[in-house]
Amino acid sequence: MTVSSFSPLAERLQIFRLLAARGAVKLRVGLTRPFLALGQWRARQPERLLIAPPDIRTGDPTTAADIYAGYYAFAGKIVNSHGRSPFSIHPPSPEWARILHGFSWLRHLRAANSALARANARSLVKEFIATSGRSRDWPAWEPGVVARRTLSWLSQSPMLLEGVDYDDYRRFIRVLSRGYWLLRRQAHDELAGDLQLTAAIAMTSFALCAQGGAPLLKGAVSALNAQLLRQILLDGGPIGRNPQTLVDLLFDLLPLRQAFAARGMSPPPELLNAIDRMTPALRLFRHPEGALALFNGMGVTAPDRIAIALSYDDARGRPVFNARYSGYQRMEAEQALVIVDTGPPPPPLFSGGAHAGCLSFEFSLGIERIVVNCGSPGPRRPDLRASARTTAAHSTLTINDASSCLFSARLGVESWFDGEILAGPVHVPVTRVENAEGTTVGASHDGYQRRFGVIHERRLSLPAEGQRLLGRDRLVAPRGGEMTDVNYAIRFHIAPGVALAPIWEGQGVLLRTASGATLTFEAGGLPVDIEESIYFAAPEGPRACEQIVVYGVAADIDEVAWSFCVPPPQLAAALAVEQAP
């Protein structure tokens, strides 16, 4: 059977609508730019910086030693400068160049806490100003790079301006001022979604830190408030639906809150409210061992960064359990935890890193993850990102090996839409029932309806004793129509380190965790396959793992009930004996 697709006419109409909307935005921004340019010409350049926001990211002194020795390791690439300025070297990748010119690595030189490291930091900034500070060439003046450099320079300014002469000080301020006005001109819908908020944070930070920045602050705060209201949803989740976004934003917003206090100003209510909502949302995604669930572009978790971000949560609040605005559900019972994706893809402008994982879930028992999604690969393997975004890379149901979303790369319009999702599930109704017996979450999505004429329904139940996870997947023909003859596969990607073995004559699977815990999986007597999989989000790079797969044809069997269970000790012992060599 061949895989169906969106009709060419539907694809062209969708692309036309998106392009028309982008064109209208660019026209509006173009009309306002002359007024912004006039404001830049009339504005007086600040004389000096009054405060420096703290950088709460941790630094690594060994990285400072590598940089002093001429080794620059960014985005999975290591470059030896051989005594030359790193800004004069042909970059090995675009992302490497962006990190270099964004200067986030300055925190490592600060962490070294030595006169040599501080002098090296000042020397490198001076080299940048001399070679790129007056340029508009890629990548030093891309808006995202400018925003990151602004935040890095401001937070590290005590080190960078220590003992410098007046001319170097003025050049430093001039580059910051030029960056502010570049962001001001482009901090509209013209930028990619998440960059709009980062740009607004950078502009607000500069206006707060600079002497005489008061005339700039009103516009910057207005942009900040607008983006916070747009991008941080009512339940605290990010509009792009990537858990990592919460960590990154908290590391920028928490110092901004402190900068307002340092200037004796009240932070905007929108800023305080966003931070208060984001920390419980971050806890929603956190597994017991400290890592974040792998949804919508989430890759390797840095547990120390999660701990630092949550340490600023004065309320030490509980996680959000029913995040209906950002589209996630959290279920807990004793030592069992389930996190479910119950939302449609983000708006196109914010979907460049989103995945087609609607109704996928992750399952932990104690501090060990059992069922996972494959996650997003790190910067060393950009070639795997497209595969990681497919529905088959998630623990959910796929139809005819197709994804529930339509990616721009598949249509050959990547240069226009930069990986955005152009179509996907629209209606994702969710029900949640909690009582003394446990928690049940039911949801469905219509991502396959247009192509295959079916709706996917999933129900997950976690009984209160926390020893079982019960699931049901069902395909439904909308409006009482006849079920189409489509093939489906229900995939359960299993975390690395969990060993799988077939039991019950191929109608079940025995799972053994690294700690020795035992679970069984069965699908109502249907054949169960064990296949190879890949875990993209391991710190050391992609790792081989396994997946449990249940195959079927909707016209024959349109509903599958399955379960993960912790077996009684006697059954676990018997199964262990059965599997012994």
Image: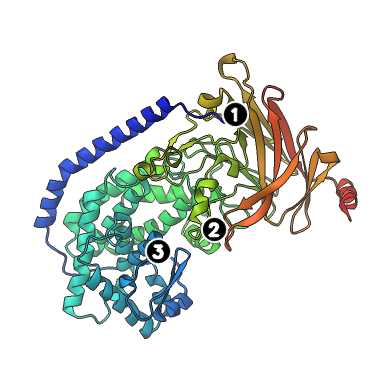
Image quadrant in which the N terminus is located: top right
Residue plotted at (10% across, 56% down) = 41
Instruction: Name the residue: 25% across, 47% down.
Output: 222
Q: What residue is drawn where x is 40% and y is 65%?
A: 92
> Which residue in the protein does label 1 denote?
456
Residue 104 left/right relative to 127: right
Horizontally, residue 359 falls left or right of residue 56, namely right
Q: Compare marks 2 and 3 and give the one earlier in the sequence.
A: 3
Q: Nearer the viewer, mark 2 or mark 3?
A: 3
What secondary structure is marked by label 1?
Answer: strand
Residue, disc 2 = 301
Q: Amino acid at mark 2?
A: Thr
Res 319 visible? no
Image spot of residue 539 (x, y percent): 57, 62
- Write the residue at 40% across / 48% down: 274
Does residue 498 show up? yes
